[in-house]
Image (spheres, rainbow, N blue to C red):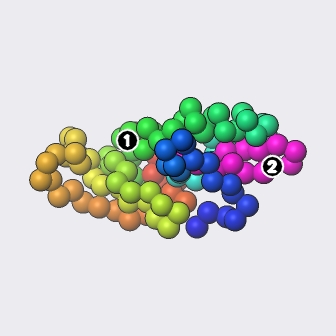
Amino acid sequence: MAPTSWIEHRRSDGELVGWIVPDGDGFTTIDLLDRARITEPVDWLSAEESLDELGIGYLADRYTLDLADGRARPVRIGEVSTDRVVVVADDFGAASAVGANPERFELPFPAPESLRPH
């Protein structure tokens, strides 16, 4: 669950793109995976602009999930909420194949460090 001090930032169509977090006299930003995007405080407008520029396209990227047994699985994000992050196995692009039933992994929010860009 996102802390109550985080302020939701939505794009013009209402889609949540991240959070703006008060930090001293300025603000930092957090993306939908709970990863810091701006770590040094900036003014409100700069925080908004950075999240608007970031958008949600990075959620369509390929990621790697490091499993407890030491294996690294290529995955794609299937669902993100402040309750959980669901990723699906993406071996050779299978996650987007029609009729595919890829293996699913339910992760906590915030997304653990074991989920990393591919």
Q: Residue 116 carries which label?
A: none
Q: Residue lying furthest front in this view?
A: 13
Q: Position of residue 18 (x, y in %)?
A: 58, 48
Q: Position of residue 8 (x, y in %)?
A: 63, 53
> Reading the chain from its start, which is encountered first: label 1 or label 2?
2
| Residue occupying image coordinates x 42% and y 44% | 59
**Distance from Cα at disc 1 to Cα at disc 2:** 29 Å
Residue 81 placement (x, y as % from top left)? 48, 61
The residue that disc 2 covers is 23
* Label 2 Cα neighbours within 10 Å, binned few <14 / some 14-19 / many ≥20: few
Magenta span: chief secondary structure: strand
Please say whether residue 71 is visible from this viewpoint: no
SS at circle 1:
helix
Considering only vertical position in the picture, is 85 above or below 41? below
Q: Eyeballing the image, is 56 above or below 109?
A: above
Residue underneath mark 1: 60
Q: Nearer the viewer, residue 29 or 116?
A: 29
Quick check: 36 left or right of 61?
A: right
| Residue sitting at x 46%, y 64% | 84
Which of the 4 image quadrants contains residue 42? top right
Badge 1, how many Cα within 10 Å: few under 14, some, many 20+? few
Q: Which stretch is magenta?
A: 17-31
Residue pushed farthest left? 99
> Is residue 9 rendered to the left or right of residue 92?
right
- Amino acid identity at mark 1: Ala
